[in-house]
Image: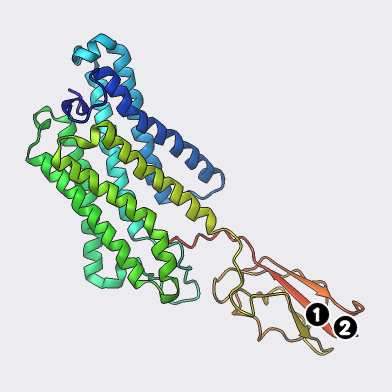
Amino acid sequence: MAIGGMNGALTLSDDAAIESVLTDIPLFAIGVLSIAAFTILLALKRVDQLSVFIFISSFLGFIAAILDLGQLLIRGHSNAANGLMLEDVSGFINAREALLALSIGAIFLFWWKFCGRRPFAVKDGRLSKSSMHCASWQRWGYVGFLLKWSSLLVCIVILILQVIWRLAPMHHLYGSLYVATATLETTISIIFILKLFLNVYLCPAGTQARVFLDYVTPALALLINAGLGVGNLVLFAFSETALGRFLRAIEVYAIVVYYLIMTFRSTQSHKPTSSIEKLPIAFETHHSSPKLWPTQLPSTLETGRPWFCAFKGVVMADIWPILPVTTPEARECRIIRQGDGNASTANKVRVQIVRCNDRINPGEE
């Protein structure tokens, strides 16, 4: 028996076949969106674990909707409306329910990974000896270690329980296993919301406002996730109704759009925030000044993003102490002469340093 067909309290149509098609529409919509988004990330080499989790969740739901539509076509409208020929399409139904369970499990794995990931607004501490950031579970030592892996275990248990109550006919009712599943979904969603607020509290003071704003969308999506768990406790298989799947589609849509914005916003050019970054800057030159060789490559102290230099054989002033910390990574630095362009008589050399797009995602751990 179809799980979604057990609950008629929130049906949009008295025709079971039409109702089944309506409940599949959100899965189709999110599936198409995730395929397009993942294709963009794959083409631009921005794929990571978070994008893989959300793509798997959406794509499995998309395939489940296709299987559901297939079993409707095989049974025909009249048989589907009257609940007949279910034995003939039991393989389609079981595969659909298994894929939906895996889809929900992938969403929880996404949230588990996201809550322990460095916030996008917090820069990668490449110049720091400590690799721990404000969202790292390691900040709390053994307690953080326990919380990290216990929350992962809960996500895996949710996936297993979803598979059991969906596939085992004896659990197609409001029983203890179903209640345990819905309770765990609600509880872990609330824990993840609290973890996001804790990340904001622990992040550097100068970035708290930005991190808080960046977390608004994920927090709202997690509230929807928790609401689906509460809905399942109040009404059996609420998440399988048209309204429940619509709310799930809103959650996934918010995640996909948020992730795309955060990913590509982090690659935009960085605005200068200090006098040393507001280049080009004029420096005094001397005949005895050393040349800035390619091994002497500067980078920003604030962002750690490398700067490269392309040299034209100009004898320059000792501008080295003025520039930020050195690093063997760089991209481009253009040296523009002023005055008559003669290195021996030029009074000043204007240096323009251009940051590179080093494809470093500040949200990565």
Marks 1 and 2 close (CB-CB < 8 Å): yes
C-alpha gap between disc 1 and disc 2: 7 Å
Q: Examine the image and state in which quarter residue 274 appears.
A: bottom right
334 or 200: nearer the eye? 200
Position of residue 66 relative to residue 178, above or below, is above
**Residue drawn 18% across and 32% down?**
166
Q: Which numbered circle lies on residue 349?
A: 1
**Image x and y of residue 333, in percent:** 72, 70
160 or 173: nearer the eye? 173
Position of residue 334 relative to residue 153, above or below, is below
**Image x and y of residue 308, in percent:** 68, 68
* Residue 215 visible in the current orientation: yes
Which element type, helix, strand or loop, lies under badge 1? strand
244 or 321: nearer the eye? 244
Q: Examine the image and state in which quarter residue 247 appears.
A: top left
The C terminus, quarter of image: bottom left
**Residue drawn 25% across and 37% down?**
101
Residue that mark 2 sits on: 346
Q: Examine the image and state in which quarter residue 78 appears.
A: top left
Position of residue 81 relative to residue 148, above or below, is above
Give the side of residue 26 with respect to residue 38, left or right: left
The N terminus, quarter of image: top left
The type of colouring in the image is rainbow
Residue type for callout 1: Val
Residue type for callout 2: Ala
